[in-house]
């Protein structure tokens, strides 16, 4: 660094020195200074492609993904046949859910550098996210040709249609995956895993296992068993310093984390153990805009898992609380490295981790779990009295929007099901179709997926099921929050899908809009949020014991205007019990504090 500073003191307008200084600053994790250095190099030498490329990398690492895309495109305008720039552009476009553009970029890079396996894996990942399973399988095979590993074989075994055509396809996939897990357990016993690359492996369990409304403990435990012992991780030694708790938030999950857990972070009690958010550098830049509690700090995680685990150990964290386990490779595999003496999972991904050797507890709520809830978890189940979130009231409109704003006539009744389309099971299609047949003035509205191809697949399936009433099934485009809340205010009834129902975000949005809800509570935590909220609000008429009763409840709430208004009034009166709940903060802080204090160096 000193040499670069010396060179610039002698010749300030020296673009190469600014470029090289930026590289050193980036290595020192001084990204903002690196960005300034690259910018200076570019101003001094317009058309400096390498500086544009490295600027894109630095911007991407600080969470400014769209700005990174602009920088990569500027570099490629100067040097079109640059595989590295094309690959990084494709990665950034993938992060922005611009899959079609990402595919074109990856394909161009693969034409220039066909031997680069990472590009084939990236193509496979994008095709998989778009639901193009045959193409995904083809590129996964190309990425692993001649060097198949446990991870590569798992990636291929977990490929499944994100919108299953029928319930039989779900059963077939589960059976196929179970067979593959058993086979891999035998054939890959003792095989070493490349831990350094696990953060980008995509080898976490498939999300369909959570969406399919079936028992998950056995299959997730067997899946996790493929890696147990392969990572050679020893339990960390007990810590003697003041208790320190970390909340793990992985890249791309900052927004949903803070919506659901931001109240807990900002209201963390002054007498509770020190709290840190454990996240990427870009995550810190995002989260720091929202964190207003001076007691809360940050631990920045490197990408590679061994480095991330070491950073946590060096920070002296007693207990790591994972908002989600299994929604990406980092939050699935990091716990296996045992970076803290005690680790806990919670409801951000509402299924068991399958990793009892790594987790002391799964933290849930008495209001969410059925009587036999403990049997659904491989970990010890800890149930707090309150719902486990301190949620700020969404800014719902003061007045209900007219249905005409959403293409409906005054006489039509609007049923909304604003859930991730992957949650809508094929068996629910028939229920929704029957609802529309019984209510000839009813219109059913979903929200489009971020991936247009997923929306198309869902549209095709539900149209086939709906038949003569398909014209009354609408899929609204994705929209800003305020427009979405306007939609809820215009609706008559909110429909909770069975199996994996609405969680805190969508249920609390409905409550903020005083929108009557209908639910058929599921057997598992992930299908019981709506019921729990209805009980808190004192509204029980929307809780159905069967799907026939579900249809009847929905139609009654939509057609009986007096009942509908009465429910809205009850929701409005009861909602203060739900939002900004300090009890949830205190209960979680006390529970995690007790687990951390009981630390004896073992997580079981």
Image (cartoon, rainbow, N blue to C red):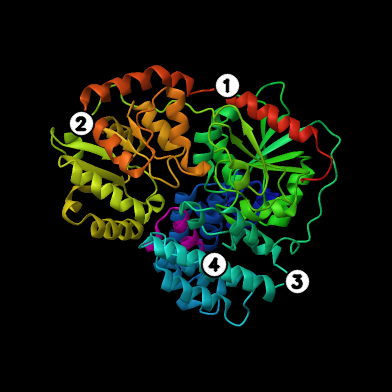
Cα–Cα span, label 3 and label 2: 63 Å
Of badges 4 and 3, nearer the viewer stands 4
- Lower position in the chain sequence, tag 4 or tag 3: 4
* Range shown magenta: 88-101
In contact (CB < 8 Å): disc 4 and disc 3: no
Q: Please state which of residues 531 and 290 is positioned toward the viewer in this rendering.
A: 531
- Lower position in the chain sequence, tag 4 or tag 1: 4
In contact (CB < 8 Å): disc 2 and disc 1: no
Label placed on residue 559: 2
Q: In the structure shown, which secondary structural element does the residue marked by tag 3 occupy?
A: loop
In contact (CB < 8 Å): disc 1 and disc 3: no
Cα–Cα span, label 4 and label 3: 21 Å
Q: Which residue has dot 1 on it?
A: 582
Looking at the magenta stretch, what is its main secondary structure?
A: helix
Which residue: 43% across, 43% down?
A: 501
Cα–Cα span, label 1 and label 3: 48 Å
Residue 581, given in percent of the width and then of the height, sits at: 54, 22
For residue 574, side relative to residue 268 (left or right): left
Q: In the structure shown, which secondary structural element does the residue marked by tag 1 occupy?
A: helix
Q: Which residue has dot 3 on it?
A: 190
In contact (CB < 8 Å): disc 2 and disc 4: no
How many neighbours does mark 4 have within 10 angstroms: few (below 14), some (14-19), or many (20 or more)? Answer: many
Residue 102, given in percent of the width and then of the height, sits at: 42, 63
Q: In the structure shown, which secondary structural element does the residue marked by tag 4 occupy?
A: helix
- Lower position in the chain sequence, tag 3 or tag 2: 3
For residue 270, side relative to residue 176 (left or right): right
Q: Which residue has dot 4 on it?
A: 177
Judge whether residue 94 is colored magenta. Answer: yes
How many neighbours does mark 3 have within 10 angstroms: few (below 14), some (14-19), or many (20 or more)? Answer: few
Of badges 2 and 4, nearer the viewer stands 2
Question: In this rendering, is residue 399 above or below 414?
Answer: above
């Amino acid at each position: 660094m000193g040499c670069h500073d010396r060179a610039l003191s002698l010749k300030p307008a020296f673009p190469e020195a600014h470029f090289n200084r930026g590289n050193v600053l980036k290595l020192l994790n001084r990204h903002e200074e690196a960005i300034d250095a690259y910018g200076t190099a570019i101003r001094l030498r317009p058309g400096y492609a390498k500086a544009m490329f490295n600027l894109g990398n630095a911007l991407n690492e600080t969470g400014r993904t769209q700005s990174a895309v602009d920088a990569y495109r500027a570099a490629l305008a100067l040097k079109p046949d640059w595989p590295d720039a094309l690959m990084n552009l494709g990665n950034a476009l993938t992060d922005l859910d611009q899959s079609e553009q990402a595919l074109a970029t990856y394909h161009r890079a693969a034409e220039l550098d066909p031997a680069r396996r990472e590009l084939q894996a990236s193509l496979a990942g994008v095709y998989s996210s778009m639901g193009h399973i045959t193409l995904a399988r083809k590129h996964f095979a190309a990425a692993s040709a001649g060097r198949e590993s446990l991870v590569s074989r798992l990636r291929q075994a977990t490929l499944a249609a994100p919108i299953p055509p029928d319930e039989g396809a779900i059963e077939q996939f589960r059976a196929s995956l179970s067979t593959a897990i058993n086979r891999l357990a035998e054939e890959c016993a003792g095989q070493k895993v490349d831990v350094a690359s696990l953060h980008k492996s995509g080898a976490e369990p498939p999300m369909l296992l959570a969406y399919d409304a079936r028992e998950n403990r056995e299959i997730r435990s067997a899946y996790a068993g493929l890696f147990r012992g392969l990572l050679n991780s020893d339990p960390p030694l007990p810590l003697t310093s003041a208790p320190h708790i970390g909340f793990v938030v992985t890249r791309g999950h900052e927004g949903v984390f803070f919506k659901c857990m931001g109240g807990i972070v900002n209201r963390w009690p002054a007498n509770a153990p020190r709290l840190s958010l454990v996240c990427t550098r870009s995550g810190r830049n995002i989260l720091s805009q929202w964190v207003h509690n001076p007691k809360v700090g940050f631990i920045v995680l490197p990408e590679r898992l061994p480095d991330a685990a070491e950073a946590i150990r060096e920070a002296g964290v007693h207990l790591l609380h994972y908002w989600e386990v299994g929604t990406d490779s980092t939050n699935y595999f990091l716990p296996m490295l045992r970076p803290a003496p005690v680790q806990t999972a919670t409801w951000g991904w509402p299924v068991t981790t399958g990793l009892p050797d790594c987790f002391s507890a799964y933290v849930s709520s008495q209001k969410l779990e059925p009587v036999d809830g403990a049997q659904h978890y491989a970990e010890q189940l800890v149930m707090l009295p309150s719902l486990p979130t301190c949620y700020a009231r969404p800014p719902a409109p003061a007045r209900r929007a007219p249905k005409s704003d959403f293409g409906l006539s005054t006489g039509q009744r609007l049923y909304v099901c604003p859930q991730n389309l992957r949650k809508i099971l094929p068996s629910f299609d028939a229920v929704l179709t029957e609802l529309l047949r019984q209510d000839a003035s009813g219109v059913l509205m979903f929200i489009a997926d971020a991936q247009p191809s997923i929306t198309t697949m869902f549209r095709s399936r539900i149209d086939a099921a709906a038949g003569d009433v398909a014209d009354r099934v609408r899929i609204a485009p994705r929209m800003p929050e305020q427009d979405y809340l306007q939609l809820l205010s215009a609706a008559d009834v909110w429909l909770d899908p069975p199996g994996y129902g609405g969680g805190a975000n969508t249920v609390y949005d409905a409550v903020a809009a005083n929108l009557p809800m209908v639910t058929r509570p599921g057997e598992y935590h992930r299908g019981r949020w709506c019921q729990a909220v209805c009980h808190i609000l004192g509204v029980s008429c929307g809780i159905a014991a069967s799907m026939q009763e579900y249809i009847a409840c929905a139609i009654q709430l939509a057609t009986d205007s007096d009942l509908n208004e009465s429910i809205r009034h009850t929701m409005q009166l009861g909602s203060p019990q739900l939002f900004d709940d300090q009890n949830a903060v205190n209960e979680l802080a006390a529970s995690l504090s007790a687990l951390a204090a009981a630390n004896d160096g073992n997580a079981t």
